[in-house]
Image: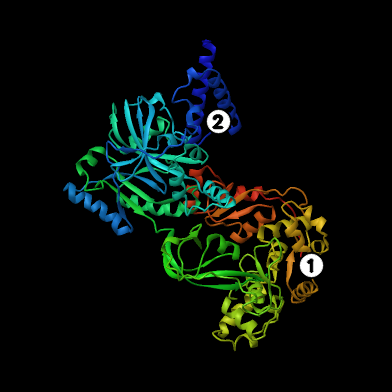
Amino acid sequence: MDPQVIRRIEELRRQLRHHNYRYYVLDDPEISDAQYDRLLRELEDLEARHPELITPDSPTQRVGARPLEKFETLAHTVPMLSLENGFSREEVFEFEARLKRFLKRDLLIEYTVEPKMDGLAVELIYENGQLIRSATRGDGYAGEDVTQNIRTIRAIPLRLSAEAGTPSRLEVRGEVYLRLKDFRELNRRREASGGPAFANPRNAAAGSLRQLDSRLTAQRPLFFFAYGIGDRAGLTLGSQWAVLQDLGHWGLPVNPFIKTVQGIEACWDYCREMEDRRPGLPYEIDGVVIKVNDWDLQDELGIKSRSPRWALAFKFQPSQENTRVLKIEVQVGRTGTLTPVAYLEPVQVGGVEVSRATLHNQDEIERKDIRIGDTVIVQRAGDVIPEVVKVVASLRTGRERPFQMPDHCPVCRSPVVRLPGEAAHRCNNPNCPAQIKESIRHFASQGAMDVDGLGEKLVNQLVDKGLIRDYGDLYALTREILVPLERLAEKSADNLLAALEKSKKTSLARFLFALGIRFVGEHVAAVLAGHFGNLEALAAASEEDLLAVKEVGPQVAGSVRSFFATPENRRVIEKLRNSGVQWREGKSVPRTLKFSGKTFVLTGRLTRFTREEAKEQILALGGKVAGAVSARTDFLVAGEDPGSKWENARELGVRVIGEEDFAGMLAAEREPKSNNE
């Protein structure tokens, strides 16, 4: 055998293990995915030519093996006990009080605190540094042998790094999980192929790991975090924190948010902090695990029947719950779109009562097979918007009723149409009261003209009484018209008139968004304002002119062209001008916008700008503004007292800039002129 081949194979294996460690443990890769793939292919080629040199721990041996007929059972040497749960501040503090009562002494206890991953618990068994077996948690005493599937997960080393001195036997406990972006992509592919969607990332991770054909598991982008150990030989450690440090040194990924704290008050602060961070994390967590750090104290505290005394799982409010669909009604939006809405038996989801959820359209209802009377799983999408995840078909009684979109608008009784290639049913009557009300509310909304005090009930009164026919009539309202209205005192009328007067001075981007042009949101409105510079140029633009704008496609171009070609829309704009509405013209930036593709988050108290002014500047230069920090955030603009978003950005490696730095990033151009100057 050629010694050079042997040396090259060993070198390739060393490099691949090193780069796996950089990527999965340190989150700091040194090479691109393409470079990694080239190293792996070279090793595969060499091993194919010299199969006698293949070893079980080679990085090439992650490919799926032949399908199993069933999973074998694998007993845990040390039981994988469940944790006692806590759901409130009182229960967290009672946990420490209980520890001190058991220990019969008062002392300052050091804890490790860590995010509670919402995945599938597994055990990895290493002997002499090599992965030999793996099992799911199961009932805590024995689980399913999923060794073949675990070997396909690149985040899990097939051989531990020897640099930290690996023990002769080590049982590692951890969580297999899916990142949210991978979960969404997996569901998209399943739905496109006609398969059912997974309800949540936890179910998707469990389903992926429990495939009898490990080649299917190999196709799923599973990740892993280690959080503890079971049986060990040749290892002497004194604390949970020391274990976590060694796990990282051996090449096993450990959650970077884990830390040690002193006392239960600090544990509670961490619980609140992680609940704030939760929406911006790239994976799902459902709580925080609190563990006594010192192993001697753990031994002294011992275990109860099925849980250790020295640990507690603080559970966040659930993001999913079961409830029942009482009825489905249709709402009409400002563009005439009919949206079916499920009215639900009220249920607490993530600490908020949910009684309604949008069902989007008829296709979505049919795809999920949602019927009136069904028991369904609901969640708050992004922890904000309620949605129906799936139907619990096993609980059907036979009395459930299918839903069908109506043939006529439920508000104005005009015929409902569904254009070819569209999922939406529409009312095409521009004088439909529902559309008029929605367009007025949109015009007055915070991101548009920002008219404070113009709520839903007041808009309904104004339209129902025939006092206004479109948003152009808002500026003709007077004290005499408003005061007689129900629940509108003189002071409220004066405040509304003052808000309307204040809203007359705005920017072109805000004005465009306020017009309610279909497919033109805040970001696209800012792009159009920046490209064309003034309303006249935009109104006169052809579809070809519009399509030449970056981020404008055929849908947006056709909608903008149709809007300005409609005489009624031009009449309303002229009515607004005559009422004194004026806007600063956009900065003409016909080429690449400075912040194109960049996402900003604003936090803390800004002194040079208001939040809305900063947001406008970002949008005008092609950027996007998000409400929470995530791995996709490019910049966090931090004012005074930035709070937890600043810490979150630091942990995720997001660039943090101060207000002065942000001002320096903005283009130094002269103040644009008003359209009326």
Percent position of residue 632, x then y: 57, 47
Q: Is residue 326 visible?
A: yes
Q: Quadrant of residue 128?
A: top left
Q: Secondary structure at mark 2?
A: loop
Residue 350 visible to an observer of this rendering = no
**Residue identified by numbered label 2:** 30
What crowding class fits label 1: few (fewer than 14 Cα within 10 Å), some (14-19), or many (20 or more)?
some
For the rendered model, the colour scheme is rainbow
Number of marks drawn: 2
Q: Depth check: 416 or 294 in front?
A: 416
Q: Which residue position is annotated with label 1? A: 564
Vertical side of 106 occupied by 128: above or below = above
Q: Nearer the viewer, residue 661 or 553?
A: 553
Give how far apart the Cα atoms at labels 1 and 2 are. 52 Å
Camera-side residue of 199 and 52 = 52
Looking at the picture, which amino acid does disc 2 mark? Glu
Q: Note whether 61 is above or below 364 in the view shown.
A: above
Q: Nearer the viewer, residue 615 or 365?
A: 365
